[in-house]
Amino acid sequence: MINIFEVAETNEMIEKENLDVRTITLGISLLDCIDADLKLVNEKIYHKIYDAARDLVATGEYISGEYGIPIVNKRISVTPISLVGGAACRTAEDFVSIANTLDKVAHEVGVNFIGGYSALVSKGMTRADELLIRSIPKALSVTERVCSSVNVGSTKTGINMDAVKLMGEVILQTAEATKEADSLGCAKLVVFCNAPDDNPFMAGAFHGVTEADKVINVGVSGPGVVKTALEKVRGENFEILCETIKKTAFKVTRVGQLVAKEASRRLHVPFGIVDLSLAPTPAIGDSVADILCEIGLEHVGAPGTTAALALLNDQVKKGGVMASSYVGGLSGAFIPVSEDQGMIDAVTAGALTLEKLEAMTCVCSVGLDMIAIPGDTSAATLSGIIADEMAIGMINQKTTAVRLIPVIGKGVGETVEFGGLLGYAPIMPVNGFSCEAFVNRGGRIPAPIHSFKN
C-alpha cells in the first residue's frame, strides 16, 4: 500500500532532485527481416519497426502525464544489423542504406535514438561483420538518430585484437567524417566487452538474439535524489551511508518498475528489465561526481575515489534489485565526463585523469565514457585504450565499454560543446607513448582461466 507520505516524497524527488525515467526503450527483433534482396530487407525493416513503435512516444507521454513522472527519452533497439543485413549486403554502402532506413523510421515514429547498428565480434569477424564495422563512419555521418556498438571481447572468448585494431581506425574515421560537428559521430559509437543483450541506454543498446520478438526495457536515473539523501547523513559512518543509498535506490527503481509495467500493458509488449543505473546529466545537482564528493572527496580523482565509487555501485544494485522483478542492462553508476558537471569540474581542476578514470571503471557499470581527447591521437593509441578497457571487463567478468571522442582540430586545454544531454567536455590529455607494435600483432587474446566452467 502506498501512503500519502510516500506520494509526497516521490513528488519532491521529481520536482527538486531531478528524478526521472531516463528512457523507455522498445527492443524489436529484425531476424524475420533477413532476405537476400537488399531492397526487401530495407522495406521489411521499415515496416516492422514502424508497426511496432508507432505508439511508443504517445504512450510514454501519456504515462508521464498520468503519473507525473518525467520520461526523458523514448528509444528503439534492434537486432545487430550485421546479422540482419548479412545475406543482402555486399558492400559497406549496402549497410549504410540500412542505417538510412533506421534513421528514417526513427524520425517518423518520433524516438530520440535507435540503437543496434552493431556487430558482435568477440571471437572473430564474418565478412558481414567487417563490412558493417567499416561502414560505421559513413553511417553515423549521414544519419541523426542511429547509434552503433561493437562487442570485441568477452570473459568466455577473450579479446579479438583484430577487431580492436579496426575499431581504433574506425573511431578516428568517424571523428574525421563528423568533424564539422566537433566529431559528434563518436558520441554515438561504443566499443564493448561483455555487452548485455537488454541494455536500454544509448549508444550501446541493441536487441539481443536471445530476446523475444518485442520487449520493453526501462532505464531509471536519480543521482540528484541519492545526493540529497546523503546530505541528511553527512558525517555518519559507512553502515548508515550504505543503508541510505540502498533505500534511495529502492525508491528510484520502484518508479521505473511502475513505468515499465504500465508501458508493457499499454503497448501489449512483454516487460523485459529495469536498468537501475545512475545516469547523470549536465544539469546542476544531477551528478554522480557530486555524490562521490558528498561521500567525502574534495574532487573526484582524489585518493579514495575508486573505493567510494565501488561502495556507491554496490549499494545501488543491492537496493534496486529488491524493487523490480527483473533487473538487467548495465545497472549501477555511469561516469561519463561530458554528461556530468562534477566530472567536468574535476578534470578542469586537474584532479581527474584518464588513468584514474580507467581505475574507476574496474568498479563502475560501464567504462571510459564520453571522453573528449585530442584530434591528433593515433588510431593505435585508441586501440590500446580500448584493449586496456576490454581487459578489465574480461578479467573481472563485467561489462566495460569505451566511448572516446577524438575531436578533430582541437587539443588539450580546449573544450568541446555537444549540447543537450551530451553536455560539454574539456579535451583530456592522452599518454603519448606508442603501443603500435602491440596492437599490430593481430589475433586474439585468450579468455582467462576462470572462464572455463563447463
Image (tube, rainbow, N blue to C red):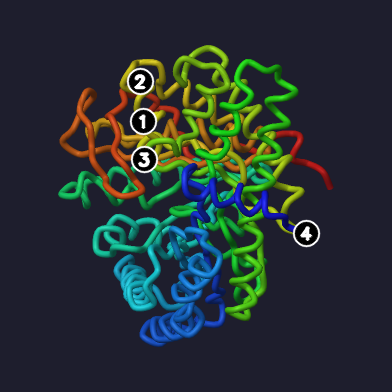
Residue that lies at the very extreme toward the right in this rendered image: 454
Q: Check whether the beta carbons of the residues at disc 3 and disc 1 lie within 8 A of each other.
A: no
- Say if residue 90 shows up in the picture: no
Report which residue position mark 3 lands on.
282
Question: Which kind of residue does numbered mark 2 sit on?
Answer: Asn
Question: Which kind of residue does numbered mark 4 sit on?
Answer: Met
**Secondary element at tag 4:** loop
Query: Label for residue 431?
Result: 2
Nearer to us in this view, 139 or 280: 280
Report which residue position mark 1 lands on.
381
Nearer the observer: mark 3 or 1; the answer is 3
- Few, some or many residues within 10 Å of mark 2 (<14, 14–19, 20+): few
Who comes first in sequence, dot 2 or dot 4? 4
Question: Which kind of residue does numbered mark 1 sit on?
Answer: Thr
Query: Label for residue 1?
Result: 4
Q: In this view, does 27 lie above or below 445?
A: below
* Label 4, label 1: how far apart the Cα atoms are: 55 Å
Who comes first in sequence, dot 4 or dot 1? 4
- Few, some or many residues within 10 Å of mark 4 (<14, 14–19, 20+): few
- Few, some or many residues within 10 Å of mark 3 (<14, 14–19, 20+): many
Who comes first in sequence, dot 3 or dot 2? 3
Nearer to us in this view, 217 or 441: 217
Question: Which kind of residue does numbered mark 3 sit on?
Answer: Pro
* Label 3, label 1: how far apart the Cα atoms are: 28 Å
Q: In this view, does 15 lie above or below 27?
A: above
Residue 75 in percent (x, y) is at 46, 65
Nearer the observer: mark 3 or 2; the answer is 3
Q: Check whether the beta carbons of the residues at disc 3 and disc 2 lie within 8 A of each other.
A: no
